[in-house]
């Protein structure tokens, strides 16, 4: 059995490491804001990550859907059109998600 001192020391070390990792971005914010590499990544990565997540989700869910990729395709088309028209990401995401859930759960989607 481990001693109480050892267990408390291990917990304290884990707490310090966890706190340090969570505090590091706030402590380094001044340096990160002025760094050109971080600024370039800030412009490029959100779009790249969202594209990869979208493709991964579309391919995975379309493959699992016995009625085909219709729900995914229609929802993505609506999100793209709504984002192009209104330029409101939250509105586009919420509308696309709601439409996807509605289409995926509707029985007539496979007949489009």
Image (cartoon, rainbow, N blue to C red):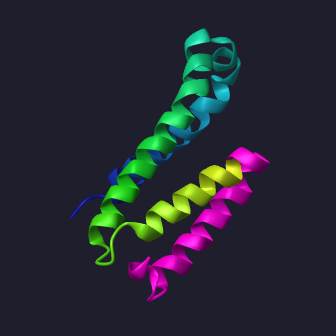
Horizontal and vertical percent position of residue 99: 59, 72
> Picture quarter containing residue 69?
bottom left
Residue extent of the magenta highlight = 84-112
Residue situated in front as seen by the camera: 15 or 30: 30
Image position of 104 with respect to 45: above or below: below
Horizontal and vertical percent position of residue 96: 60, 64
Which secondary structure is most common in the magenta stretch? helix
Q: Most extreme residue toward the left, as rendered?
A: 1
User: How many numbered discs sit on the rendered protein?
Assistant: 0
- In the drawing, does residue 68 fall left or right of residue 11? left
Residue situated in front as seen by the camera: 40 or 25: 40
Residue pictured at 54% horizontal, 36% vertical:
47
- In the drawing, does residue 94 fall left or right of residue 12? right
Residue situated in front as seen by the camera: 101 or 111: 111
Image position of 63 with respect to 17: above or below: below
Residue pictured at 65% horizontal, 26% vertical:
27
Horizontal and vertical percent position of residue 49: 47, 39
């Amino acid at each position: 059995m481990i001693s109480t001192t050892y267990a408390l020391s291990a917990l304290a070390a884990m707490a310090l490491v966890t706190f340090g990792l969570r505090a590091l971005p706030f402590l380094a914010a001044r340096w990160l804001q002025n760094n050109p590499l971080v600024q370039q990544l800030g412009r490029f990565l959100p779009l790249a990550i969202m594209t990869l997540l979208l493709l991964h989700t579309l391919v995975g869910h379309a493959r699992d859907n016995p009625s085909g990729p219709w729900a995914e395709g229609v929802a993505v088309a609506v999100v793209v059109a709504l984002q192009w028209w209104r330029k409101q990401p939250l509105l586009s995401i919420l509308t696309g998600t709601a439409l996807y859930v509605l289409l995926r759960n509707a029985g007539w989607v496979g007949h489009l």
